Amino acid sequence: MTIPNSKKEQLFHSLSQANTAFNEIYQGDRSDRQPVHTLYGGANLFKSDAPIALGNRALEILETYAPNHEVFGKAFGLTGGNDFSKRIYDKVVAKLKSEAIEDFRIDFEDGYGNRSNEEEDETAVSTAKEVAKGMREKTLSPFIGIRVKPFTEEMKERGLRTLDIFVSTLVKETNGKLPDNFVVMLPKVTIPEQPETLANFFTILEEELGLEKGVLKMEMMVETTQAIMDIDGTNPLYRFIKAAQGRCIAMHFGTYDYTASCSITAKYQEMDHPVCDFAHHVTKVALAHTGIWLSDGATNTMPIGPHRGDLTPTQEEENRQVVHRAWKKGYDHIRHSLWNGYYQGWDLNPAQFPMRYAAVYAFFLESYDDAVDRLKTFVDKAARATLIGDVFDDAATGQGLLNYFLRALNSGAITEDEVLATGLTLDEIRGRSFKKILENRKAK
């Protein structure tokens, strides 16, 4: 080589610093379990046993409007034959019986509305006590949190006050404990100073209440055009993340506020509108590989029949048609989100749970057999190319297949045993890197 070692070291010193800084930002996806949905419910309605009660209600609705897998498969337009419909149906029934709600967001914003300060104070106290009761009785969902009002100039006082009362009451009731996977959602973020203020308030709460430093986490909402492009013509989302001081774990999309901010009329405010796709893609590009979870919004067409009480056969059929149409619409929206790489979304009513899990399970299981064969072949081909010193330049395809198994396992669509059919170990799958799998196998 022509270059002296001293000059090479000088060249690489600044490069190493830059590479290290880059790797610290883009650490890759987190290995933690990400919920496939978040249920939003008004804070005034929350009870400690809500996950159980709402799960039972979801199962009752499923059994009413899809009493068997044939009706279920037809309602969602499932392809793949009778056995495939039965496989999805059985998985959905089991899920509704065991863990119908993965994530619950107790809502003090749109789902609660603007009430008197006295009433919201009382709700913050009573809801915190219900959460504490749920912790004691182990009835809470695996993930839980609250959504406060935005830190806009008009709402900042109310948002901070509700959070203060809720967390202070909860910590008092539980002797200093928070639920597992507890998070605070900040809606309608438009400037970095809003999450920065919330992060600073977290620090004060932790100090005053004797909580572990850094235990309070937040998530933010993309609901305005300014969150996609600011006045300088740049995307501000990573600046929001930096302002959160390491406390932000997720970014959620608010379908209806965002479409309204784009002047979309009510009839066309849907999750699959092109303006939403644009926001989804910009958000994903801005935050890819940073470890921030992304979640889509909700379908606001509820699968609820118009008739109540003692029904005639005609009314029962009308109810069934309404529910099936709403299910299929929501199912298609969820499939659209999954196709775009958004593996979490919102639900607003237990009647939507069947369509949520039907869409998630069908999306992954349709590809399972093919993905197993492709990954087996791909790993073998790549390993042989590596061993003989050949160039294997299609690792991105292998990573795509690996991503499929990671997400399918996370969602519950497939089991650990079904992952092992690929010939990879669980540690290799959870390592989340196809390149490292090849490197480790070569070393061995």
Image: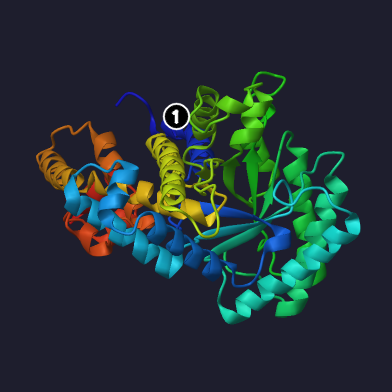
Residue at position x 80%, y 68% in the image: 125
User: Does residue 436 appear in this view?
Assistant: no
Residue 82 location (% of width, % of height)? 18, 51
Which residue appears farthest toward the front when viewing the image? 312
Residue 99 location (% of width, % of height)? 45, 66
Quarter assignment of residue 371: top left
| 84 and 155: which is toward the camera | 84
Q: Which residue is mark 1?
A: 7
Residue 288 location (% of width, % of height)? 48, 37
Horizontally, residue 350 falls left or right of residue 421, namely right
Residue at position x 50%, y 34% in the image: 284
Horizontally, residue 197 falls left or right of residue 133, namely right
Quarter of the image that includes the N terminus:
top left
User: Does residue 37 appear in this view?
Assistant: yes
Residue type highlighted by circle 1 = Lys
Q: Is residue 385 above or below residue 3?
A: below
